[in-house]
Image: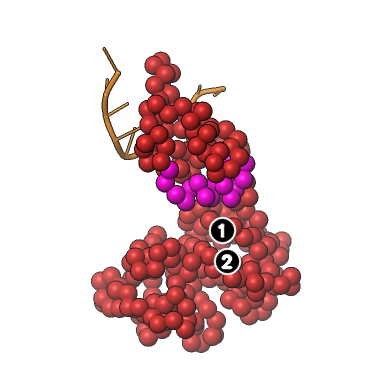
Chain colours: A red, B orange
Amino acid sequence: MTECYIRVAEDENEEPMEIPSEEDGTVLLSTVAAQFPGACGLRYRSPVSQCMRGVRLVEGVLHAPESDWGNLVYVVNYPKDNKRKMDEMDAASAVKIKRGVQKTSDLIVLGLPWKTTEQDLKDYFSTFGEVIMVQVKRDAKTGNSKGFGFVRFTDYETQIKVMSQRHMIDGRWCDCKLPNSKAGPDEPMRSRKVFVGRCTEDMTVDELRQFFMQYGEVTDVFIPKPFRAFAFVTFFVFFPYKYNLFCVRHSFCPHI
DNA sequence: GTTGAGCGTT
């Protein structure tokens, strides 16, 4: 397979835009996102099943569903797609997803001015929502700030908002991210793993992967044996969605 | 008394 252009649109009925592939025939998610900011993947309607299918995404690289991309129009996936899917939900077909997402976690605040104090941080971040704690990390001997700290909010919505933007604090741009280390007993819930409830016995690992890849790159699917009516789906990156109910009727297994 | 990518004394 060689370099080509694939047709990508925001919606099946929209005018497609041609996006270049790489020399090996793959397409970089970053290339898609350059034209469609916020894109987290691609999907397409299978000519065979007439169902929407996710395009395989491995470490930011989109792979053609067959030997090549063909003439299909690929539709951009956005995180906000969840909201529309909510409208399609009904009790009989919903899959409940519990995730740590409702639970907040500490955020590391990078790039703090040397002079910024914990009170400064508290004052600043309180404008977003209720703050549980703030820390400015300091040298034990000198007491000088190390230029970073931590913050934790009461509400997950606040955390999402704060993580989604840069922050001007005392004259410097700062970033709030999920910290790397420290997976203490309090932290595993911010994992990339989501709990998928109300599974039926005939769901397979492949089908779950196929369905959930529209929300981001899936790195693992676990179905307990024997059957226990739930599964775990693990994402490559932190699962950034607000809603925890998904309809799978139209885009997942035909047997639901 | 300086600095500017990173990752948390309790």
Q: Is residue A156 magenta?
A: yes
Q: In this view, does A139 lie above or below A23?
A: above
A93 to the left or right of A29: right
Q: Mark 2 lies on which chain?
A: A
Which residue is at a point 30% across and 73% down the rendered structure image?
A21
Marks 2 and 1 on same chain:
yes
Write down the residue under mark 2.
A82
Q: Residue furthest right?
A: A91
Instruction: Report the front residue among B1 and A44.
Output: B1
Which residue is at a point 74% across and 70% down the rendered structure image?
A91
Res A41 → quadrant: bottom left
Q: What residue type is labelled 1?
A: Tyr
Where does residue A233 sit, x and y in percent of width and height? Answer: 57, 59
Write down the residue under mark 1.
A241
- Write down the region rendered in magenta: A153-167
Residue A125 visible in the displayed image: yes
Where does residue A69 sit, x and y in percent of width and height? Answer: 37, 80
* Screen quadrant of the C terminus of chain A: bottom right
Q: In this view, does A156 lie above or below A225?
A: above
* Screen quadrant of the N terminus of chain A: bottom left
